[in-house]
């Protein structure tokens, strides 16, 4: 893996990822995913470097529909103080256990499902921005405006 860039002063890392469920949320085969939601959201909220995550009054983002043409796609968005903080949550916490089971609940998509980008500290990114950046990543590949953990870019300062 490429070394993760440090956050420049005044910037945080935004991330969004999408997944298409194999079945509706209330289907028994998705129960394992639903059971992970509360504990993983609580873990994220308490993780070092966590800043913000997309959620409704229910405490998660499963009811958010960011894609007008496809209500089977779930979106998850969050903001972190640094790439390392996000990496540690995703790959060095209990989150990894759920991530390893994603094929039990989500279709394998041929295109990019996760996008990263820098935001000024204190900024809450809009869903539309996440959708636009994911489309940019899919269309043009990693760039300073939309990148991945494998091909990160430093924050512009």
Image (cartoon, grey):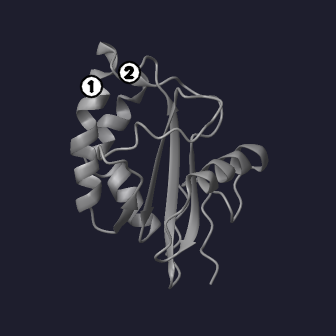
- Drawn side of residue 89 relative to residue 130, left or right: left
User: Looking at the picture, how far across and down is residue 69, in whole percent?
Assistant: 65, 30
Residue 24 vs 54, above or below: the answer is above
In x, y percent, where is residue 72?
A: 52, 26
User: In the rendered image, which residue does mark 2 sit on?
Assistant: 104
Labels in figure, total: 2
Residue at the farthest front position: 57
Query: Badge 1: few (under 14), some or many (20 or more) residues near its Cα, within 10 Å?
Result: some
Element under disc 1: helix
Of the residues under marks 2 and 1, which one precedes in the sequence? 1
Q: Position of residue 33 (x, y in %)?
A: 31, 29
Depth check: 145 or 52 in front? 52
The correct choice, above or below, for 139 with respect to 157 in the image is above
Identified at 50% across, 72% down, the residue is 123
- Considering the numbered disc 2 on the image, is that residue within a helix, a strand or a loop? helix
Tell me, yes or no, whether the two marked residues, 2 and 1, touch with CB atoms within 8 Å.
yes
């Amino acid at each position: 893996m490429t070394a993760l860039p440090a956050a420049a002063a005044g910037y945080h890392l935004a991330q969004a990822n999408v997944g298409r469920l194999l079945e509706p949320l209330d289907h028994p085969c998705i129960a394992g995913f639903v059971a992970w939601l509360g504990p993983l959201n609580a873990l994220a909220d308490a993780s070092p470097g966590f800043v913000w995550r997309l959620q409704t009054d229910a405490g998660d983002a499963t009811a958010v529909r960011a894609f007008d043409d496809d209500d089977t796609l779930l979106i998850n968005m969050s903001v972190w103080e640094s790439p390392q903080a996000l990496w540690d949550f995703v790959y060095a916490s209990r989150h990894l256990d759920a991530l390893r089971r994603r094929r039990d609940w989500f279709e394998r998509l041929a295109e990019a499902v996760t996008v990263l980008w820098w935001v000024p500290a204190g900024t809450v990114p809009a869903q539309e921005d996440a959708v636009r950046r994911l489309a940019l990543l899919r269309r043009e590949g990693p760039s300073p405006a939309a990148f991945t953990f494998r091909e990160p870019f430093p924050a512009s300062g």
